[in-house]
Image (cartoon, grey):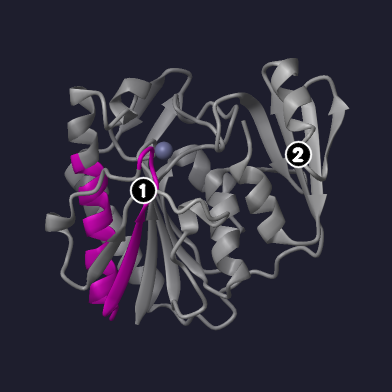
Amino acid sequence: MKVFISADIEGTTLTTYWDQTRTLTEAKAKPHCQQMTREVVAACEGAIAAGATEILIKDAHGKGINIDINQLPECATLIRNWSGHPLSMAYGCDETFDAAMFVGYHSAAGRNGNPLSHTETTQTTSVRLNGMICSEFLLYSWACAMMGVPTVLLAGDKMLTEDSKGLHPKLKTVAVKDGFGAMIRCLHPKVACDKIRQAAEEGLKQDLTDAVPQLPEHFVFELSYKEHKVAAKMSAYPGCKLVDDLTVRFESDDFMEVLRCGQHIM
Ligand SMILES: [Zn+2]
């Protein structure tokens, strides 16, 4: 059984400040890379307990070199840095995978459930997809669905898990922290990992027929910016138009084009 895991850092249990996520330049980010690695390892262990024999992990934060491969099981391979492909945080997943898991994911732009909430960029106050709150989890778990791969696990902040309910029929969620304003209340790192391990195993052990949601036939991607200048510039992207001074709308029938637009978000 083949499993794809996409890992971010702002939704791991301890991250609270942006400098803790600047993993290349800030020494204080090191423990957060370690926790990101531990949460990914926990997902791998749960997947292996449920029968996974091959695991591909996309290190999907910052420069993409946060996870310590030495701690991963030997059946895992790791994608570091970025290809530039629109699949971005889901890069590497394809039709041959049996399931996808998302670890360390965070609330969408403008949501107060995580002090580090954002969607692709920190320049927007809200991002919507077909009227729904659009998190990075929504974008990339739908990218997996587009390839016929069911998403069975989401670990991240509590608000993201609540916002994501109903997106995937067989989704198991783990809320490793709960935020309000600038604060977080987090689980003990070991408890967070235990819960992730268990949910990964339970998620993958389910009957996964009919586990892939039917995606809409048309996509309306709407981005509201903090600054009108950024919205104006973004409105020059092919297919984008300005709907008010701060808001840009992109429409397509092809979800890959939404992802491509997402890659050009400022
Ligand atoms: Zn990140």
Q: Is mark 1 within 8 Å of ligand 1?
A: no
The magenta-colored residue range is 34-63
Q: Check disc 1 and give the amino acid type.
A: Asn
* 212 versus 216 height, above or below: below
Q: Give coordinates of residue 238: x percent, y percent.
A: 79, 44
Q: Check disc 2 and give the amino acid type.
A: Tyr
Front residue of 239/103: it is 239
Does residue 41 belong to the magenta stretch? Answer: yes
- Picture quadrant where residue 29 is located: top left
* 26 versus 265 height, above or below: above
Label 1 environment density (alpha carbons within 10 Å; few <14, some 14–19, many ≥20): some
Quadrant of the picture in which ligand 1 is shown: top left
Front residue of 76/203: it is 76
Residue at 71% over, 40% down: 128
Q: Which residue is denoted by mark 1 in the rendering? A: 81
Q: Is residue 214 visible?
A: yes
Under circle 1, the secondary element is loop
- Picture quadrant where residue 206 is located: bottom left
Q: Which residue is denoted by mark 2 in the rendering? A: 237
Label 2 environment density (alpha carbons within 10 Å; few <14, some 14–19, many ≥20): some
Give the mark, 2 or 1, whose residue is nearer the N terminus: 1
Residue at 60% over, 27% down: 110
Q: Give coordinates of residue 157: x percent, y percent.
A: 42, 39
Residue at 46% over, 80% down: 96
